[in-house]
Image (cartoon, grey):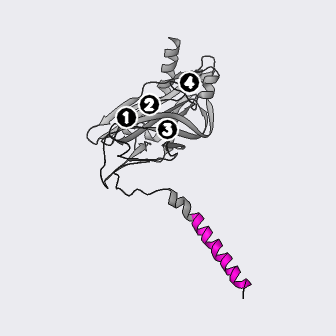
């Protein structure tokens, strides 16, 4: 009962719709496809058919004194559907930003994900967050510091369309900020005192579902090009020196 009351007190300060004028700064976040390590989600329909699932990881970067977080993301619900959201290390193997606090005895406080679908625009919305509870700590929570990237949560989606031939379905998974948040909600981190929090700002993740004949840009050539240029210049330099030697 005490835990339930304390949890309600923490979330009354953190998880709610906030006025746009409440924030003036932002913390960097990243939406990542764990298969490739970037925010690109490209799926060949011959491999990922309808009802195939994929995972999205949401990270936050370089945060101090964080006691709670919330994310608010959107997507094209005709392309993909929300399946589930979880926090690695809480209800599955792995670690997350609060792992240190949990190791020190704090208890995870993770409300169920909130899903909304706007049928007028076919847009899906996910609101999700967590904090930790520690009875003897100030404000009953153990704040953490994140250096580099720290994992907030993972989200699974189910593919809803199949592309054939050269067809490509394009969309995006968006982190919603103050200007794009639906109903006043947005992604944010919070200090132990709660308050309005600090907005998380993450670049949109590109979504592509393509047919087997579609031309999808590959990353490898762009990586090779600089090396090719350097190699060409070295060969030209060696050839020039060789010509000078035989003059």
The image position of residue 197, as x and y in percent, is 52, 35
Residue at position x 52%, y 12% from top? 2
Q: Range of the magenta residues?
A: 226-247
Distance CA(mark 1)–CA(mark 3): 14 Å
Q: Viewer-proximal residue, 244 or 76?
A: 244
Q: Is residue 143 above or below residue 208?
A: above
Residue at the extreme right of the image, as rendered? 245
Residue at the extreme front of the image, as rendered? 246
Q: Is residue 143 above or below residue 46?
A: above
Name the residue carrying label 4.
132
Secondary structure beneath dot 4 equals strand
| Quarter of the image where one finds residue 177 | top left
Residue contact at pointers 1 and 2, CB within 8 angstroms: yes
For the C terminus, the quadrant is bottom right
Which label number is shown at residue 82?
1
Q: Viewer-proximal residue, 20 or 92?
A: 92
Q: Dot 2, how many residues are within 10 Å of its Cα: few (below 14), some (14-19), or many (20+)?
A: many
Q: Earlier in the sequence, mark 1 or mark 3?
A: 3
Residue contact at pointers 4 and 1, CB within 8 angstroms: no
Residue at the extreme top of the image, as rendered? 1
Residue contact at pointers 2 and 4, CB within 8 angstroms: no
Q: Dot 4, how many residues are within 10 Å of its Cα: few (below 14), some (14-19), or many (20+)?
A: many
Q: Earlier in the sequence, mark 4 or mark 1?
A: 1
Q: Viewer-proximal residue, 137 or 95?
A: 95
Residue contact at pointers 2 and 3, CB within 8 angstroms: no
The image position of residue 143, as x and y in percent, is 61, 29
The image position of residue 190, as x and y in percent, is 54, 32
Q: Is residue 110 above or below residue 182?
A: above
| Quarter of the image where one finds residue 155 | top left
Name the residue carrying label 2.
85
Q: Earlier in the sequence, mark 4 or mark 3?
A: 3
């Amino acid at each position: 009962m005490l835990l339930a009351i304390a949890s309600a007190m923490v979330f009354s300060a953190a998880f709610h719709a906030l006025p746009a004028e409440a924030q003036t700064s932002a913390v960097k976040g990243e939406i990542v496809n764990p298969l490739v390590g970037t925010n690109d989600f490209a799926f060949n329909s011959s491999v990922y058919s309808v009802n195939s699932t994929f995972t999205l990881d949401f990270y936050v970067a370089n945060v101090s004194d964080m006691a709670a977080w919330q994310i608010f993301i959107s997507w094209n619900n005709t392309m993909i559907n929300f399946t589930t959201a979880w926090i690695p290390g809480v209800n599955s193997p792995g670690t997350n930003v609060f792992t240190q606090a949990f190791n020190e005895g704090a208890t995870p406080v993770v409300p169920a994900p909130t899903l909304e679908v706007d049928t007028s625009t076919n847009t899906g919305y996910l609101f999700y967050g967590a904090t930790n509870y520690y009875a003897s700590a100030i404000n009953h929570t153990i704040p953490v510091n994140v250096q580099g990237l720290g994992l907030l949560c993972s989200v699974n989606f189910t593919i809803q369309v199949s592309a054939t031939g050269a067809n490509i379905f394009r969309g995006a998974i968006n982190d919603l900020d103050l200007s794009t948040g639906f109903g006043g909600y947005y992604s944010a981190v919070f200090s132990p005192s709660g308050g309005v929090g600090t907005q998380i700002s993450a670049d949109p993740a590109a979504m592509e579902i393509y047919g087997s004949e579609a031309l999808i840009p590959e990353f490898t050539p762009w990586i090779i090009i600089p090396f090719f240029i350097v190699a060409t210049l070295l060969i030209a330099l060696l050839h020039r020196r060789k010509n000078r030697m035989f003059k």
